[in-house]
Image (tube, rainbow, N blue to C red):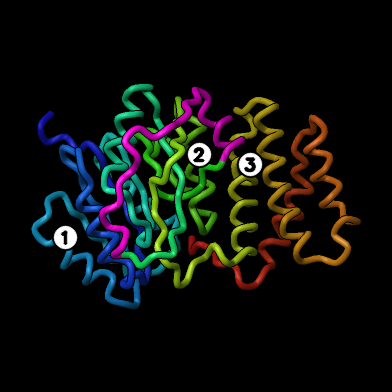
Amino acid sequence: MENEIDVSFVMTVYNKEYYLPAVLEALLNQTGLKNPEFIFVDDKSKDRSVEIIREKTKGIKNVTIVAKEVNEGISVTINQGLVLSRGKWVRMLDSDDILPIDSTYKMIALADIHKADMVYGQFKKTGLEPMELVSWTMPGGPSYVYKEDALDAVLHGRFTRMGQLIKGEVLKKSGGADERVFIQDESIPLRAARIGHGIIKIFSEVVLVPKETNNLSKNTKQLDNDRFFAHYNMLLDYCDCLDDKTLKTIYEKALSANWKYVKKNMKHPYLTDDFKRYIQAKLFMVKPDFAFLEKAAKRFYSLSGVLRTKI
């Protein structure tokens, strides 16, 4: 259909006025697309983020701007944008992610060739000013790998950065981000891959990271917490419909996140039960011990300096 949305770009926004002019220029100039839409959900920014978006998108069709009155966190905010999306494909991004201008078109083309529901690529920390990146393109024929089993690929690879392309119906059926986890990076690929068929990993940058000012990736407690809960919640939600091998791998991922926190923050970490459980899961075919995971969850919940969603 002529007016069908081919791809929905869904961006979460929070206090990113420094990045937005460049981010928006690269986003609005994506090449090779027929009828894209642009959805911006602002999580109650305290700066001029919403004003900049309104200025830069004036006269652009298929633009939706949601200026929330309550700050609820990234996962909740991204889901609010996903609900509004109408595209066959959805590409999500943070408001400091700059997309090579031909990356979306090339990702869709590969997905169509292989009938894949998910496409990921690499990201590059450039250290450059945002406006230096607005005209970047991908290599003419980037190398990639296709995996039919999307969940197995996600569990054994790195698929956590925003900028991924996922079929809209798959994202909505999966529920999008786990709203119990503040950062969405881990939960979206896990949940989408559970029902998606086929995934492509491109060995080229599909997201460019400019010079960073304030980034949650520097808060290792937050990362360990969110990685743990993304996998722990996956076990709680889907333990009855996943095979033993997959359950074991997800359990190992949860234990790994827990062990990373323990190793950095507790005395004599190698004498703890946390280390013992982690090694057992790596070496043997063990079933998830939900009683142990619940104890680890309570410890994570007790941490200060970790952001939580407000649901």
Residue 232 badge:
none
Whether residue 177 is situated above or below residue 241 in the rendered picture = below
Closer to the camera in the image, 38 or 72:
38
Question: What type is the residue that disc 3 sits on?
Answer: Leu
Left or right: 238, with 39 as reference point: right
> Which residue in the structure is indicated by mark 3?
236
Task: Name which residue type carries label 2.
Answer: Arg
Label 2: state its secondary structure.
helix
Q: Residue 19, position in %: x, y?
A: 33, 67
Tag 2 or tag 1, which sits nearer the N-term? Answer: 1
**Does label 1 or label 3 sit earlier along the sequence?**
1
Q: Amino acid at mark 1?
A: Thr
Question: To which residue does mark 1 refer?
Answer: 57
Specify whether residue 84 is in view. no
Percent position of residue 41, x then y: 31, 59
**Magenta residues, as a range?**
131-157
Q: Give the alpha-carbon distance from disc 3 to disc 2, as whole Å.
A: 13 Å
Can residue 294 be seen in the rendering of this structure?
Answer: yes
In front of the other: 194 or 156: 156
- Please tell me in which quadrant of the rendered image residue 105 appears: top left
Q: For the N terminus, which image quadrant?
A: top left
Task: Bin the neighbour count of mark 2 within 10 Å (Cα to Cα): few under 14, some 14-19, many 20 and up.
Answer: many
Residue 191: image tag: 2
Quarter residue 135 falls in: bottom left
Q: Residue at x 54, y 64 (%)?
A: 308
Residue 223: x percent and y percent? 60, 59
